[in-house]
Image: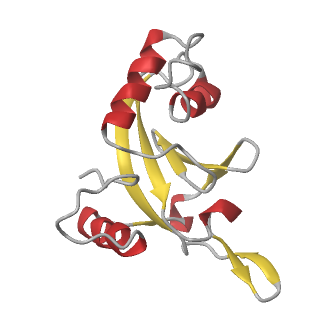
Amino acid sequence: MTTTVTIYHNISRDAFFGLNTVLTDDGKATQPGTHPLVKVYAYEIDMWKAGGFEALWKALNVGDDPEFNGDMPLADVLLAQAYRERKLRSLSVGDVVRVGNRWFTVASAGWTEVKAAELQILDTEAAEAAVREMFQMTSDEELTVTVPLS
């Protein structure tokens, strides 16, 4: 069954700790809705027939590199190429993937399902402003790394 898969980049400076995990004086703490997410890519696929999360992870991390994608199905290589054509960074810890109506975050090992209420998804305008601020880019510079999808 074909479904929409949507990729959201986590643009918090604490993203590498995991979704909504922030560094506090006492160590790390989880605070739902604290990490801003930017919608960057969407496509239609039969997620489970296509290899599930493992295939998705590989396609959005090494899939466009001929040195590493020799064993990947052509559909995954094409997905990786289309993703990189948007000048997007690799999928990373703290990023979120929506598969149909379910939400998953990239964990340090594997994936964790999360609730939509725990997410702070920025609209396109707010996302562009946040990305420019985070990477200190002027309004005339082309966005790369995290490019909002409208």
Task: Please determine whether, in this image, residue 36 is positioned above or below residue 63.
Answer: below
Q: How many marks?
A: 0
Q: Quadrant of residue 29?
A: bottom right
**Quadrant of the image for the N terminus?**
top left
Task: Please determine whether, in this image, residue 50 is positioned above or below residue 138.
Answer: above
**Residue at the farthest right position:** 26
Q: Position of residue 63 (x, y in %)?
A: 51, 25
Q: Position of residue 25 (x, y in %)?
A: 77, 89
Residue at (55, 17) in percent of width and height: 69
Residue 18 visible in the picture? no
78 left or right, relative to 63: left
Q: Position of residue 68 (x, y in %)?
A: 59, 20
35 left or right, relative to 86: right
**Residue at the farthest left position:** 140
12 left or right, relative to 88: right
Q: Position of residue 51 (x, y in %)?
A: 59, 19
Task: Please determine whether, in this image, residue 6 is positioned above or below residue 2.
Answer: below
Residue 85 visible in the picture? yes
Q: Quadrant of residue 81?
A: top left
70 left or right, relative to 127: right
Residue at (59, 33) in percent of width and height: 57
Residue at (36, 72) in percent of width and height: 130
Q: Quadrant of residue 48?
A: top right
Q: How is the image coloured?
A: secondary structure
